[in-house]
């Protein structure tokens, strides 16, 4: 396997410190002293114009005077020197530079120098970390290229921070708690190397078991989200963000006014399967618990205590943290009633009475752990007469080892229970001085579990009864408005776009005069609704531009004139195209909801759902998610709103048609994916009842598409690439489909592998596996289409869909090339499938801008090697394994 392209930065074999110094208090002195003191096993080269020796080590005036290869240059000199130094590094062949000194990005001259430095680095292929960083540390390797003066313990957590000051504080806090690190990476201004690439490196780092991120702002949301999702599939990631409310989402629609940037960041992290916390203490506690493999299956907590006061306080904390107190099953209640004192609390919290013996504690806690209604147990012990804290602690440690559910332990007091706390620490049990801290951790574990479920959602194409959208028609409407110099679509135009995506709308007809309005009303049938039609007015009610329930011609004429008059008085500058005439929809059991789209500067389009009507900003009832969406994500959005609780059967109201409502959100997701021009949207109100849904009003804001924007380049999460679905015919006449693999293909993929011959399985997997492991199956079917692709060839037969072959690639970390694999079912070999599928895979790789495709083939796999020659691959012996051949093809 080729080394990661950032290896010279994170695992250098030789380091030059440009600006290394003996001057006390200087960054050059601190960095070089740390490298010397850390027992770094590589070679160190101090570079100083004025001194021939630094800290007892011979120095040179320039990196070009170093006779040996250099992996990393740490630069601590003044900003003005950077362009010349970067040229020297490039000519020396150095591939990684750490800019450890601060610069004033508010100064125009310094910004120009930094930009020149970046340009030079790109010319030479040098990667830069910084500037304005604390530095870079790999404690597990004794590598400390930072100006942090205290020692950092080695451990299995990686810390990545955008703030040097906060990084220093977190390191100091961690040291006091005995927490160690595999890596400490200060990102700073992220001139070049950013979060995405750092995460990619840490995913592959065997020393790292968990990742902690401090984030202030994101430069490349697509790369960040792609890397974050990849990391979260294999390692727990915990994030703390500063500046939660400083950047509001700006816009003109209700949807935009209801959303704050902190909400969008939360939604992004949830889709990435990571946990967001609010404090440094929560950051490290959550990371330690997750790294120790504490997991929950839900959010239902049982509290067991021998003191009702502490138990109630713990329950209050659960309520404040939105942790659900578990309702014990009948079987559990029957068991406890038979073994506990008659005066126990008979509910949750479980007060098992002050004199509770160790065995009573064990019985109660085990009953809760065994209860299917319980996801975790909080044990609150109070030292009272007749209790035995140490024996009880030993029994709890035994229960934790026996159970897959988490046990949180809080032994109240100090000196009296200190021995038990030491026992918990040695056994690596989650224990807390106060129960509220444990409940907070349980809440975070439940949130993490929910986010991991969201991570698994990879929305595929809309299927079933849903008709394909008329994307061309929607684009035509938008293009006409933009050509006319407008970025706000009229209600009629907005509804045309919605209808193109199969969203039911209340038909709208334009009337420029009262006579035209009468004719339209006669065609529609009374009663009708009149609304002002103006490209300059978004909220028609604000100018008195709406009249409802008009039942006859006389009332209509009067209403028409009144709307025009009120609008001209309220907005004399507004253009008025006329008045729209619409059917008056009277639906007795209707609920009004709103579906919207807003745009976040970092993460792009965001979909919102909540209560509708004119008071949406007062009600502030909304849930949001990043597209693309599927049924699970849509149902989750609806469930997390107050209006969502009113959509089922309620008193005399029948349940709304939930399927139709969810379809609207799915179609809006499809709109957002296919229309990068769509900037904001309100469907308000969207009326839902037992008969279905219908959009009574809509407004859409658009912006011109950037000419350089790639397909789906406007989105933070790559959607299912439906455009890659093609139908073809094999040489023998068999009709087949080539399409990207979807999560629901897992069973079909497993059956495909099981049916391969032993030889075919060995040729593909270089082992004698009979079937894919669960982790492999997840990896092969739950794809991040931004960094990998798997194309399946399938055919329809009487029992359903059958997989005939699959070809896949995964991109290299540098996004320059990719590694491929191909497997064809034995009985379908020799029919041209491999050639057809690989040709489609080439197109997919070229679409991602990849330049080379490579792979490894067993030297004895003559059929595959013959195909490689036919496809134009170069074939060479493997330099390290004679049983393999290396194949590569320029794209």
Image: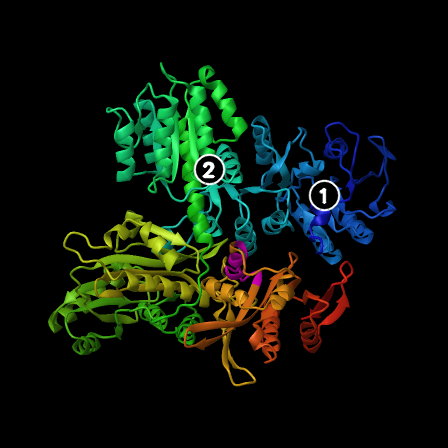
To which residue does mark 1 refer?
A: 79
The quarter of the picture where the C terminus appears is: bottom right
Q: Position of residue 188 (x, y in %)?
A: 62, 43
Q: How is the image coloured?
A: rainbow
Task: Give the SS element for disc 2.
Answer: loop
Crowding near the residue tagged with mark 1, few <14, some 14–19, many ≥20 C-alpha atoms within 10 Å = many
Q: Position of residue 611 (x, y in %)?
A: 28, 53
Q: In this view of the protein, which residue sits in the foreground, 685 or 658?
A: 658
To which residue does mark 2 refer?
A: 278
Mark 1 vs 2: CB contact within 8 A: no
Left/right placement of residue 596 relative to residue 854 reads left
Stretch in magenta: 775-788
Q: In this view of the protein, which residue sits in the foreground, 879 or 183?
A: 879
Q: Position of residue 106 (x, y in %)?
A: 61, 44
Q: In this view of the protein, which residue sits in the foreground, 780 or 182?
A: 780
Q: Residue at x 83, y 48 (%)?
A: 69
Say which label, 1 or 2, has the lower sequence index.
1
């Amino acid at each position: 396997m080729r080394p990661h392209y950032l290896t010279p930065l994170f695992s250098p074999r030789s380091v030059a410190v440009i600006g290394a110094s003996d001057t006390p208090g200087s960054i050059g002195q601190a960095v070089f002293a740390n490298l010397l003191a850390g027992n770094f096993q590589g070679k160190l080269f101090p570079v100083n114009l004025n001194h021939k020796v630094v800290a007892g080590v011979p120095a040179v005036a320039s990196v070009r005077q170093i006779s040996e290869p250099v992996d990393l240059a740490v630069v601590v000199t003044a900003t003005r020197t950077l362009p010349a130094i970067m040229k020297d590094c490039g000519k020396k062949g150095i591939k990684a530079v750490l800019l450890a000194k601060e610069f004033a990005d508010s100064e125009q001259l310094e910004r120009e120098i930094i930009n020149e430095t970046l340009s030079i680095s790109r010319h030479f292929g040098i990667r830069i970390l910084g500037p304005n960083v604390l530095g870079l540390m790999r404690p597990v390797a004794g590598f400390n290229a930072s100006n942090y003066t205290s020692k950092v313990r080695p451990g299995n957590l990686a810390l990545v921070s955008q703030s040097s000051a906060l990084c220093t504080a977190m390191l100091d806090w961690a040291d006091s708690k005995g927490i160690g690190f595999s890596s400490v990476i200060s990102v700073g201004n992220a001139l070049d190397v950013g979060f995405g690439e750092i995460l990619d490196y840490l995913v592959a780092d065997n020393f790292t078991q968990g990742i902690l991120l401090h984030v202030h702002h994101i430069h490349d949301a697509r790369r960040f989200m792609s890397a974050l999702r990849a990391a979260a599939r294999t390692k727990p990631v915990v994030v703390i963000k500063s500046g939660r409310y400083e950047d509001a989402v700006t816009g003109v629609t209700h949807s935009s006014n209801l959303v704050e940037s902190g909400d969008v960041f939360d939604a992004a992290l949830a889709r990435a399967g990571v946990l967001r916390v609010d404090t440094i203490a929560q950051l490290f506690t959550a990371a330690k618990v997750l790294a120790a493999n504490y997991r929950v299956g839900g959010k239902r907590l049982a509290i067991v205590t021998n003191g009702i006061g502490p138990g109630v306080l713990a329950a209050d904390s659960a309520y404040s943290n939105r942790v659900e107190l578990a309702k014990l099953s009948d079987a559990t209640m029957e068991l406890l009633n038979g073994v506990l004192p008659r005066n126990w609390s008979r509910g949750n919290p479980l007060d098992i009475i002050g004199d509770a013996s160790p065995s009573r504690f064990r019985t109660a806690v085990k009953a809760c752990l065994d209860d299917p209604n319980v996801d975790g147990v909080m044990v609150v012990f109070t030292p009272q007469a007749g209790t035995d804290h140490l024996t009880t602690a030993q029994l709890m440690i035994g229960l934790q080892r026996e159970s897959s559910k988490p046990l949180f332990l809080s032994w109240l007091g100090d000196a009296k229970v200190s021995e038990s706390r030491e026992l918990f620490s040695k056994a690596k049990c989650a224990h807390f001085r106060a129960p509220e801290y444990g409940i907070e951790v349980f809440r975070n574990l439940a949130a993490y579990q929910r986010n991991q479920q969201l991570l698994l959602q990879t929305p595929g194409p809309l299927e079933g009864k849903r008709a394909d959208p008329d994307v061309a028609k929607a684009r035509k409407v938008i293009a006409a408005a933009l050509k006319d110099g407008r970025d706000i679509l009229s209600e009629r135009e907005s509804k045309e776009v919605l209808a193109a995506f199969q969203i039911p709308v209340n038909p709208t007809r334009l009337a420029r005069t009262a006579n035209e309005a009468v004719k339209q009303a006669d065609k529609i049938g009374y009663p009708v609704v009149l609304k002002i039609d103006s490209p300059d007015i978004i909220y028609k009610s604000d100018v008195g531009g709406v009249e409802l329930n008009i039942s006859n011609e006389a009332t209509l004429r009067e209403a028409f004139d009144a709307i025009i008059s009120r609008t001209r008085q309220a907005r004399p500058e507004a253009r008025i195209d006329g008045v729209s005439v619409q059917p008056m929809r009277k639906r007795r059991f209707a609920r009004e909801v709103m579906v919207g789209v807003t745009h976040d500067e970092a993460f792009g389009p965001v979909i919102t759902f909540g209560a509708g009507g004119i008071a949406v900003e007062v009600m502030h009832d909304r849930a949001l998610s990043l597209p693309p969406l599927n049924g699970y994500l849509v149902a989750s959005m609806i469930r997390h709103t107050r209006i969502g609780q009113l959509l089922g059967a309620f008193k005399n109201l029948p349940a709304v048609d939930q399927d139709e409502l969810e379809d609207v959100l799915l179609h809006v997701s499809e709109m957002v994916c296919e229309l990068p021009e769509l900037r904001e949207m309100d469907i308000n109100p969207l009326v839902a009842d037992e008969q279905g849904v219908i959009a009574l009003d809509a407004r859409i804001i658009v912006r011109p598409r950037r000419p350089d924007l790639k397909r789906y380049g406007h989105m933070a999460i790559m959607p299912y690439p439906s455009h890659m679905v093609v139908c073809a015919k094999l040489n023998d006449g068999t009709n087949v489909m080539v399409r990207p693999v979807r999560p629901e293909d897992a069973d079909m993929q497993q059956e495909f592998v099981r049916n391969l011959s032993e030889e075919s399985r060995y040729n593909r997997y270089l082992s004698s596996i009979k079937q894919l492991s669960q982790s492999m199956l997840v990896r092969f079917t739950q794809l991040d289409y931004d960094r990998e692709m798997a194309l399946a060839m399938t055919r329809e037969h009487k029992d359903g869909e059958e997989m005939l072959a699959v070809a896949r690639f995964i991109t290299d970390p540098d996004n320059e090339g990719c590694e491929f694999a191909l497997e064809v079912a034995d009985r379908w070999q020799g029919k041209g499938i491999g050639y057809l599928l690989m040709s489609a895979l080439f197109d997919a790789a070229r679409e991602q801008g990849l330049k080379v495709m490579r792979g490894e083939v067993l030297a004895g796999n003559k059929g595959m090697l013959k195909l490689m020659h036919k496809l134009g691959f170069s074939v060479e012996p493997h330099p390290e394994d004679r049983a393999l051949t290396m194949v590569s093809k320029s794209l």
